[in-house]
Image (tube, rainbow, N blue to C red):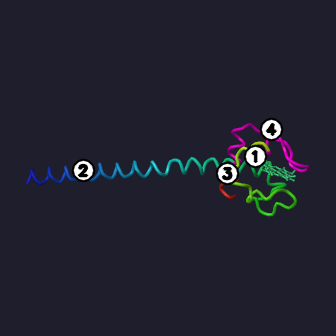
Amino acid sequence: MKCSADLKGKRASRVSFFLAWLWCLGLGWVLPLSVWADDADLGRDLYHELCAGCHGKDMLKPGLAFDLKTFPANDYSRFEKSVLQGKGNGMPAWLSQLNVDDVRLLWAYVRSGG
Ligand code: HEC
């Protein structure tokens, strides 16, 4: 009797070890994704505070301003330059109000598609 109880205990601990291992594997995948989502969320707040007036709520209906949904997703350096230094006639320079970290949050938001 005692012996079989021990055996059961061992089997149970092996199962929970396996589950813990799976859990770790799962977290390994999920963590970078959730960090990305957080950046996009913070960027969304900034966007709605500063940019939505011209580029449209949730980047929809940008009117005369650039449609950010069509901004090339692989061109961060152009994004940073346009945001910090401004562009053309209508896009203000944000250098005095935003730092590079803010621009990266905005970039995460723009790349998330709104
Ligand atoms: C006062 C209106 C206005 C505000 C506010 C504004 N933009 Fe713009 N933005 C424009 C206009 C107009 C253009 C098109 C400029 C051009 O190409 O001549 C533009 C263009 C852009 C571009 C494309 C530039 C390129 O490389 O072609 C990006 C990226 C951009 N804006 C990001 C932002 C972000 C991020 C914010 C908020 C921090 C913001 N804008 C706030 C009016 C605005």
| Gap in angstroms between the C-alphas marked 4 and 2 | 55 Å
Under circle 4, the secondary element is loop
Could you tell me the amino acid type at mark 4? Answer: Gln
Q: Which residue is mark 3?
A: 74
Could you tell me the amino acid type at mark 3? Answer: Asn
Q: Image height check: is 13 above or below 95?
A: below
Under circle 1, the secondary element is helix
Measuring 85% from the left and 56% from the top, which residue is drawn there?
A: 65
Tag 1: Cα neighbours inside 10 Å, few (<14), some, or many (≥20)?
few
Quadrant in which the N terminus is drawn: bottom left
**Which of labels 1 and 4 is toward the front?**
1
**Which of labels 2 and 1 is toward the front?**
1
Marks 4 and 3 close (CB-CB < 8 Å) = no
**Which of labels 4 and 3 is toward the front?**
3
Is the CB–ligand 1 distance for label 1 below 8 Å? Answer: yes
Magenta part of the protein: which range? 82-109
| Gap in angstroms between the C-alphas marked 3 and 1 | 9 Å
All told, the count of numbered labels is: 4
Question: Of the numbered discs in the image, which one, if any, rests on residue 70?
Answer: none
Could you tell me the amino acid type at mark 2? Answer: Arg
Q: Which residue is mark 2?
A: 14
Closest to the observer: 110 or 14? Answer: 110
Q: Residue 95, position in %: x, y?
A: 81, 37
- Is 13 within the magenta? no
Q: Which residue is mark 1?
A: 78
| Gap in angstroms between the C-alphas marked 4 and 3 | 25 Å
Measuring 68% from the left and 43% from the top, which residue is drawn there?
A: 104
Is the CB–ligand 1 distance for label 4 below 8 Å? Answer: yes
| Gap in angstroms between the C-alphas marked 3 and 2 | 46 Å
Q: Residue 50, position in %: x, y?
A: 80, 48
Quadrant in which the C terminus is drawn: bottom right
